[in-house]
Structures are given as structure tokens and as C-alpha cells.
Image (cartoon, rainbow, N blue to C red):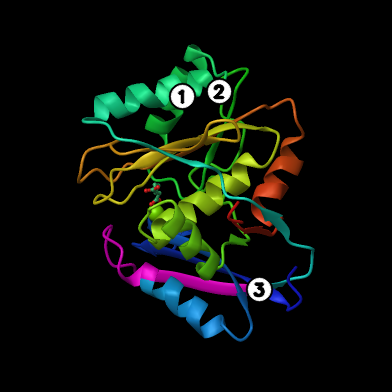
Amino acid sequence: MQEERLYSVRMRAAKGGPHEQGGKHISGGEMLSTYENMRQAVNHLLDKALTHSKGNPDFVQIQFDAIDEPIKQIDPLLIRKNEVESVEAGQALVRELLEQAGIKREVIDKAYKQLAEHSDMRGAILVDVHSGERIDDRREKGVRVSRMDWWNANFEQWANHFNEPSYSRVKEALVLATKVSAHPATIAELCWSDDPEYITGYVASKALGYQRISHLKEYGDEQGCRLFFVDGSNDMDDYIFFLEKQPVFIHWDEV
Ligand code: PML
Ligand code: MG
């Protein structure tokens, strides 16, 4: 597919110093770019870092590195929209969907406890579906899914077709959810934003698709969630390598 050399472009922003020195996570971003479009990609990520409603960062890092491996192309997960009236109704639907994905109630309860214990995560928490225990050893850093993107022109076609606003927030969430669910060790993902002005989130899996839920927390709440329910009997080093390093492009074909 892609002939030209591509680069992974990444941003992370924090307030009160860099993340590793205890700074509060403000924002992160992932893109793929050609060399020619690098300025545009860096500007996009810089803009994202400078305008986040969690506050103005005093530490921002933007880096790029060349991709030498073949890039995997994946179809976006099917999107389903669930309108709910309250956080309670949204969270009840989360449980229903996770149970549909085959996750036991006790495991879901344990996973929520993990969330409560880690309030300033910048990556994802990995929870084993057999034990309900957290199985990554990344503490507040979590696992950061990286090296992925969706060309805007194709995303806009998709958005048009599904009557979605073509917001980059939706694109980025769907890119990440699609990459994560493409690995057979992922049973489901649960996510909502740490942005105090954004209350929509989702449950995703290959079988469920991208189940957007309109209301998963209250406005003003900066407690986000990114949790992967994983079949821990797989090789977790391979799994984390896939999440962090396997380059992936999302591409939608109108059928
Ligand atoms: C985020 O902003 O960090 C996650 C947003 C998830 C939901 C995006 C959507 O509206 O589909
Ligand atoms: Mg965010």
C-alpha cells in the first residue's frame, strides 16, 4: 500500500514538570506522517498540547522516528451509538456490554478497583480476565498504544457515511480501539476521557464493535479510564510489543 517512508510522531504534555518527575498528565497524541507533512503533524500535536481543558502544560515533548517495518492495514470497528440519560445508566450499560464480551462480574468489580487506585494514568491498565488482577507493571505510566493513524481524507469519508462529525477526538479513539481489538488477546476495552469537558466513552471489542456511550461521567470530572481486559494466558510481552510498536493504519472501504 504505502510506498513512501513514514514516521511515527508522538506528543506528551504534563503540568508541574515531566511525567516521570511527578507532573500531572495533560495530553498525549499519536500520528503517522510522511517527511513532507511533518510540520503539519507536529503543529497538530502541539496545538492539541497547548489547548487542552486540563490546563496549560509546562512540559511538552514531541518526537518522531522512522518506521522501517511493514504497516498493518485494518478496517475500523463498526460504530454503535448508545444514548443514555445519566452516568448510572451509562455505567450499567458498560457492565452489560462487558458481560456480553464474556467477562465475569467479579472481574469487572476488581477492574474498577484498579481504576480507583490509579487516578493519574497516561496509558492503559491491563487487567487479566481470569483473575481480575492488573497484569502490566507500568504503574501510573500504563501501556501507551502507539504507531497508528488514519488518513484524514478516508476518515472524513467514513464520518460522512456514518453521519458522524469528523472530530479528531473520535478518529483518535476509534484508531486506538481498532488497533487494540485487532489483537486476539484483547477481550474488550473500556474508555472514557480524562477531559473534564467530555463525558462520552465507549466499550469496544471485535465482536461488539465500538459501542459509544453518551454519558459515562459527570462534567468537570478529570478521572479518565483506559482499561484493556486481556486473556493473560497469552504472551504479555508480545502483546505489549504489538500495542506499542506494531505500526497500523486504519482504512475504511465503502461496501
Ligand atoms: C478521549 O478523549 O481521550 C477518549 C474519547 C472517547 C470517546 C470518543 C467518542 O466520542 O467516540
Ligand atoms: Mg485525553
Look at mark 3 in the image and give the residue it sits on. 7
- Above or below: residue 19 compared with residue 90: below
Looking at the rendering, the quadrant in which ligand 2 lies is bottom left
Labelled disc at residue 101:
2
For the residue pair 221 and 22, the one nearer the viewer reads as: 221
Farthest right residue? Answer: 69
Tag shown at residue 97: 1
The residue at the point 49 percent across, 57 percent down is: 158
Give the side of residue 124 with respect to residue 236, left or right. left
* Circle 1 residues within 10 Å: few <14, some 14–19, many ≥20: many
Q: Nearer the viewer, residue 117 or 241?
A: 241
Residue positioned 68% across, 74% down in the render: 6
Measure the C-alpha gap from mark 2 to mark 3: 35 Å
Amino acid type at image mark 1: Leu
The image quadrant of residue 73 is bottom right
- Label 1 to label 2: alpha-carbon separation: 6 Å
Disc 1 + disc 2, Cβ < 8 Å = yes
Eyeballing the image, is 170 above or below 60? above
Measured as percent of width and height from the top left, residue 247 is found at 69, 59
Circle 2 Cα neighbour tier, 10 Å, few/some/many (<14 / 14–19 / ≥20):
some
Q: Is residue 179 above or below residue 72?
A: above
Q: Is residue 38 visible?
A: yes
Image x and y of residue 29, in percent: 48, 62
Label 3 Cα neighbours within 10 Å, binned few <14 / some 14-19 / many ≥20: many
Give the amino acid at mark 2: Ala
In the image, which is nearer the foreground, mark 1 or mark 3?
1
Q: Nearer the viewer, mark 2 or mark 3?
A: 2
Residue at disc 2, secondary structure: loop
Disc on the earlier residue, 2 or 3: 3
Residue at 37%, 31% (x, y): give it: 116
Residues drawn in magenta: 48-64
